[in-house]
Image (tube, rainbow, N blue to C red):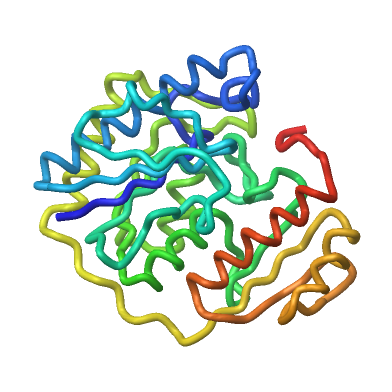
């Protein structure tokens, strides 16, 4: 069984603030250590379920948060950027299942460090008219590749978001949001045991492949900056819904990859910290 793990940072055990997850933050070095511990618990669960090959994609920020020597020796690591598929780099239909570790809720949700890809710069997103964030877009893209997302770890808001998207996914809350930068934390040993057991349960029996997706999907994004939206109209196939909202239609995962280009354009036009 081949397993793919996309690991973000905001939903990791113990982390609640930008200082925990941004390079240069006062507690970032501790945060990256905790990130590795959560993903290692997921790797242990996958191994217990019979995984023979495990690929981990460092999917947060600079995408070089996990120190290679801190990762479980049974897993391979995709590290650094740019990546054509960003948070899903390396995922192909050859994998039997995907896991989302350390994920967070979408922009506007009252979850720990909630946002959608770019802090305040992205105000809202919709996939085929359905509100979506990193969780739903990752799930839909993986499904388009024929790979089921079977487990997610993060705060309780992220777990609820995943359950609303797909109730069959095993979710493991490692903290409970009190506000956007405050949470009640599960003890680390308890959280890591829950991750390991949840992943093993999600992979037993072996997951079924998702049904083939629709031929095309429509992604709409509302930006904080009208300048970003106006600039994106220079990309063929991108149209305006209003002065700050653009949309495009196409097959996943190609649409997910195009969205990565949108974010690079937005980054070039803005310089806003993600959690201000």
Left or right: where 68 falls relative to 129:
left
Residue drawn at 76 percent across, 63 percent down: 222
Q: How many marks?
A: 0
Quarter of the picture holding the C terminus? top right
Is residue 75 positioned above or below 218 on the image? above
Query: In the current view of this chain or complex, which residue is farthest to the bottom?
Result: 215
Residue drawn at 49 percent across, 54 percent down: 135
Query: In the current view of this chain or complex, which residue is farthest to the top?
Result: 26
Of residue 74 and residue 208, the one placed in the foreground of this image is 74
Of residue 225 and residue 186, the one placed in the foreground of this image is 225
Is residue 61 positioned above or below 97 on the image? above
Residue drawn at 48 percent across, 46 percent down: 158
Q: Quadrant of the rendered structure where residue 20 is?
A: top right
Q: Quadrant of the rendered structure where residue 189 is?
A: top left
Is residue 190 positioned above or below 196 on the image? above
Q: Where is residue 184 in the image (x, y as percent from the top left)?
A: 48, 24
Residue drawn at 48 percent across, 36 percent down: 11
Q: Where is residue 17 in the image (x, y as percent from the top left)?
A: 62, 25
Q: Where is residue 71 in the image (x, y as percent from the top left)?
A: 31, 28
Quarter of the picture holding the N terminus? bottom left
Left or right: where 72 falls relative to 38:
left
Is residue 185 positioned above or below 125 on the image? above
Of residue 164 and residue 69, the one placed in the foreground of this image is 69
Q: Where is residue 131 in the image (x, y as percent from the top left)?
A: 61, 65
């Amino acid at each position: 069984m081949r397993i793919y793990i996309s690991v973000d940072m905001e939903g990791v055990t113990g982390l609640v603030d930008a200082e925990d997850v941004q390079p240069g933050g006062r507690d970032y070095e501790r945060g990256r250590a905790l990130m590795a511990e959560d993903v290692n618990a997921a790797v242990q669960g996958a191994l217990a379920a019979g995984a023979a090959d495990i690929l981990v994609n460092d999917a947060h920020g600079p995408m070089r948060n996990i120190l290679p020597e801190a990762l479980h020796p049974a897993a391979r690591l995709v590290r650094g950027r740019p990546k054509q598929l960003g948070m899903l780099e390396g995922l192909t239909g050859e994998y039997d299942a995907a896991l989302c570790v350390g994920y967070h809720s979408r922009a506007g949700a009252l979850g720990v460090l909630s946002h959608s890809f770019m802090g305040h710069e992205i105000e809202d997103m919709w996939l085929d008219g359905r509100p979506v964030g990193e969780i739903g877009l990752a799930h839909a893209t993986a499904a388009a590749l024929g790979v089921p997302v079977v487990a997610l770890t993060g705060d309780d808001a992220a777990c609820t978001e995943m359950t609303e998207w797909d109730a069959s996914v095993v979710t493991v809350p490692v903290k409970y949001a009190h506000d956007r930068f405050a949470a009640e934390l599960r003890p680390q040993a308890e959280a890591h045991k829950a991750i390991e057991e949840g992943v093993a349960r999600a992979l037993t029996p072996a997951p079924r492949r998702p049904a083939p997706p629709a031929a095309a999907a429509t992604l709409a994004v509302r930006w904080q900056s009208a300048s970003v939206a106006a600039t994106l109209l220079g990309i063929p196939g991108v149209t305006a819904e209003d002065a700050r909202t653009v949309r495009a239609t196409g097959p996943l995962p190609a649409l997910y990859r195009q969205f990565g280009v949108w974010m690079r354009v937005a980054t070039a036009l803005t310089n806003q910290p993600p959690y201000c």
